[in-house]
Amino acid sequence: MIRKLNRKAKALSVAAAKLAGERHCTDIVVLDMRKVSQVTDYFVILTGTSDRQMRSVADEITDIAKKQKTSLFGRAGYETSHWVLLDFVDVVVHIFDKQSRGYYDLEMLWGDAKKVKI
């Protein structure tokens, strides 16, 4: 059963993806998880080019969420910057370095999820 469209979550997902593109991240994908996960509505997956860029993008996405009145529930990997995870409950942002992105391959793991047009 698909959950109802959460416009606020979709808006945050698209805004995060657009910001990542503006900051020169690569392989940016937004997945609609409503049909395949009971845990979250959207995944935003992207690849950063350096530790510094990944942390900067994570900080800026967190700022966007605050402006949209969405709280950060949890953050992981910020210090090591191989995989920074930002959990906004309805939206989970995954910021990978190139090697970790290939290793975890979330798009394949969640292959049944529909891609959202950015």
Image (spheres, helix red, strand yellow):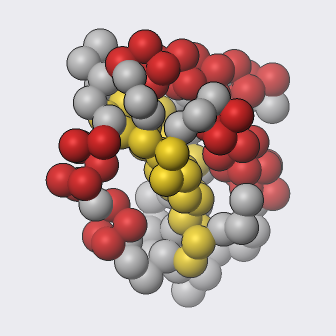
Q: Nearer the viewer, residue 7 or 19?
A: 19
Quarter of the image with the N terminus is: bottom right
Kindly give the residue lying farthest to the left in the view shown: 103
Left or right: residue 4 compared with residue 35 = right
Left or right: residue 58 compared with residue 66 = left
Kindly give the residue lying farthest to the bottom in the view shown: 1
Q: Quadrant of residue 48?
A: top left
Residue at (72% x, 43% y) in the render: 18
Can residue 85 be seen here? no
Left or right: residue 16 compared with residue 58 = right
How far across and how far down the image is residue 3, in percent?
64, 74
Q: Nearer the viewer, residue 19 or 90?
A: 19
Left or right: residue 96 compared with residue 6 = left
Residue at (31% x, 23% y) in the render: 81
Residue at (23% x, 43% y) in the render: 100
Q: Nearer the viewer, residue 18 or 11?
A: 18
Residue at (54% x, 16% y) in the render: 56
How far across and how far down the image is residue 72, in percent?
56, 27
